[in-house]
Image (cartoon, coloured by chain):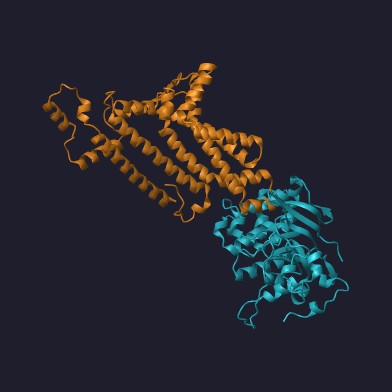
Amino acid sequence: MTEPLLSVRDLRVEFPTRRGVLTAVDGVSFDIHPGEILGVVGESGAGKSQTGAAIIGLLEPPGRVAGGEIRLDGRRIDGLTADQWRKVRGREIGAVFQDPLTSLNPLYTVGRQLAETIRTHIPMSERAARARALELLQEVGIPGAKDRLDAYPHQFSGGMRQRVVIALALCAGPRLILADEPTTALDVSIQAQITALLKRLCREHDTAVMLITHDMGVIAETADRVAVLYSGRVAEVGPVDDVVNRPRHPYTEGLMACIPTLHARPARLAQIEGSMPSLRAIPTGCAFHPRCPRAHDRCVAERPPLFENPPSAAACWLWAPNADRTAAVSAPS
Amino acid sequence: MIAFIVRRLIQSVLVMLAVALVGFALFHYVGDPINNLVGHDTSLADRAQLREDLGLNDPFPVQFARFVVNAAQADFGISYRHGRPVEDLLVERAPATLELSFAAGLFALAVGLPMGIYTALNRRGWLSKAFLTISLIGVSLPTFLIGILLILVFSVWLGWLSSFGRGETVQIGWWTTGFLTWDGLRALILPSITLGLFQMTLIMRLVRAEMLEVLRTDYIKFARARGLSARAINFGHALKNTLVPVITITGLQLGSVIAFAIITETVFQWPGMGLLFIQAIEFVDIPVMAAYLVLVAFVFVVINLVVDILYVVVDPRLRVGGAAGGHGS
C-alpha cells in the first residue's frame, strides 16, 4: 500500500472552558491516501468539523490540539506557526465550507478573489492569475465563465457559488481538499451536481478529499472509504461498501437502519434510541453503551480500541479477537 | 443609479420643505416680530404700517411661499440684533465653524479608525483595554467639561495653547482660514479635540464592534483557509466590510459636529455659527435662529445624500437594481 497523504493519529482536540475541559475529539486516527475520498460521518457534535478544523489549523480559540499528531506527506503539521500554516492552507490543503452564500466576500468580484488566492501561493502576474482564474471557473463548470469573472458573489446562485468556492479551493493545486458539509446548504438536485463535480475533479487531479457530512447518502455516492465518528471517537472505519452494507459497530448498524427506503413504508421511521451524550457527560467505557442494544459489562467498564477486521475496523468489544459475536453477526432485520 | 439619486433628491427637497415650515412657524409665532423690531415709543399706526409693509398681514400660505422662495435664494431677512442681512452674518461665520468641524472630523477619523482596528485585532492586549477604558471617558464626559479641562491643563497650567478665538487668520476671497498660519493651527488644536473626542470614541467603538463581527464571518474563515496573509485578510477583506456602517455613522456625525459645534464654540469663544446662534437665542434674534435651523437641516440632508451615494460605491450589492433597501433615513 502507498504512503498515506494525510495521517491522523490519536488526535485530541480540547476546549478549556470555565467549567472544565471539554474533549471534542478524543483519540481519532485515520489515513487518507493520495486521490482517495474519505467520508467522515457523524451526528452534530460528533467532532467531525473539529477534526477538520484541526487539520487545517483553524480551530476556534480556545480550542486546541491537545494530543496526537497530524502528518501531511510524512511531515507533522500540528503545532506549526501562523506563517507556516499559511503555506499549508490553500497551497497543500484546500477547503470548502458548508455555506457558499457566506463563504465569499460580498465586496469583491469572484475573479479578484480567485486571482488574489492564486497570487498568494504562486508568484505570477495579475494577467496570468486572471487567465488561470478563468480556467478554474471553466473547470468547475460555470457557464459563460469569461463574463462571470467580473461578477460579484451575490450575482450567482447557491450552487454556482459553491462551484466558485471549489475553484477557490483548487487555486494552488492542493493535494488534499477538506470539504466540510459542502452540500448541506444546497437543495438536493444541486447537491448531486456538486458531489459529482468534487468526485470528477478529485479523479482528474489526483486530489484527495476529506468529505465531512452527516448525510450517509452523499458518502455512499462519493466516498471510497468512510470513518464513522461518535462522541469525538472513531466508531468504525472502512471501505464504503463494507460499512454501508455490512456495518460492524452497532452504532453504524443503527445509522444504516435509519435510512428510509422507497420499498418499505413503516408507520414510524427507525431511529436510535436516545441521543448522543453531551461533551460534559461522556459515559465511561464505550461512549455508545447507554444506547447500544448489545452492550454488556465490559462496554461500561472499558473503552474499546479499534479492532482491525479487514477490510474495516470497529471500536466495539463485539469485534475483539475471540469475542462471542453470535449476537453481532445477526443481520439487522 | 440615476433613478436612485433622483428619488433621493426629491426626498431631500421634501425634508427641506418640512424644516422650512418649522423655521417659518418659529419666525411667525414666537413673539411678535414687530415688537422685536421697533422701540417702545413707536405709535400703533406706525406699527400697523410696518406690519403691512413687511407683508405680515398676508395669508399664511403666501407668507410661507415667500419665506421658502427667499430661503432658497439664501435670503433670511435682517438680523434684529445686528441689523445686517442674516446670510451675510452666516457667510462671515461659516468658515470658522466649517474649519473647526473639518479638523474635529479629521481628528476623530484619523485617531478613531486605527484605534478601532487595533483594539479589534488585539482584543486581549493591555493597550486595547487601556484604549477602551479611555474611550469610556470620551463617551461619558460632557463636551463643555472636556473643553474646560483641556483649557485648564494646556492653557492655564502648561500655557502651551491659547484658550479662545481663532488666532491669526488669512483672508482668501470671502473665506477666512486659520489653516495657513501657525497661530491659526495652534488655536484649532484644543477646540477640535474637544469637539471630535466624542466622535472619535464613537468611531473607535463602532469600528471595533463591526470588525469583530466581520472577523467571525464565514468568508473571513474561508479567506484564512485559502492561506491569505493576515494583512490581506484584516485590511483587504475585513476592513472593507466594516466600512459601510462606519461611513454612515461618520457622515451623520459630521452633520452633528457642524450643528452642535455650539457648545465647543461657546467654551472657546470660537467666532463661528454656533456662537452666533447662541447669541441669537439670548436676544431672541428670530431670523438668525430660523436661518440656522434651515442651514443645519440642509447640512444633514446633503450629508445623508452623500452617504447614500457612498454606500452604492462601496457595496456592489446595492449597485444592481438600485432600489435595494437598508439605507439610513
Q: How many marks?
A: 0
Q: Is residue A27 above or below residue B94?
A: below
Residue B276, x across and y down, in percent: 35, 26
Between residue B190 and residue B179, name the one nearer to us.
Answer: B190
Between residue B143 and residue A330, name the one nearer to us.
Answer: A330
Left or right: residue A36 versus residue B206 is right
Between residue A98 and residue A94, name the one nearer to us.
Answer: A98
Chain drawn orange in the picture: B
- Residue positioned 85% across, 76% down in the render: A324
Residue A283, x across and y down, in percent: 74, 62
Chain drawn cyan in the picture: A
- Residue positioned 16% across, 36% down in the render: B57
Q: Quadrant of residue B92?
A: top left
Q: Tell me if residue B39 can be seen.
A: yes
* Residue lying furthest left: B45
Q: Is residue A223 above or below residue B78?
A: below
Residue B3, x across and y down, in percent: 41, 52
Left or right: residue B46 versus residue B203 is left
* Residue lying furthest front: A297
* Residue lying furthest right: A322
Residue A301, x across and y down, in percent: 80, 65
Q: Tell me if residue A316 can be seen.
A: no
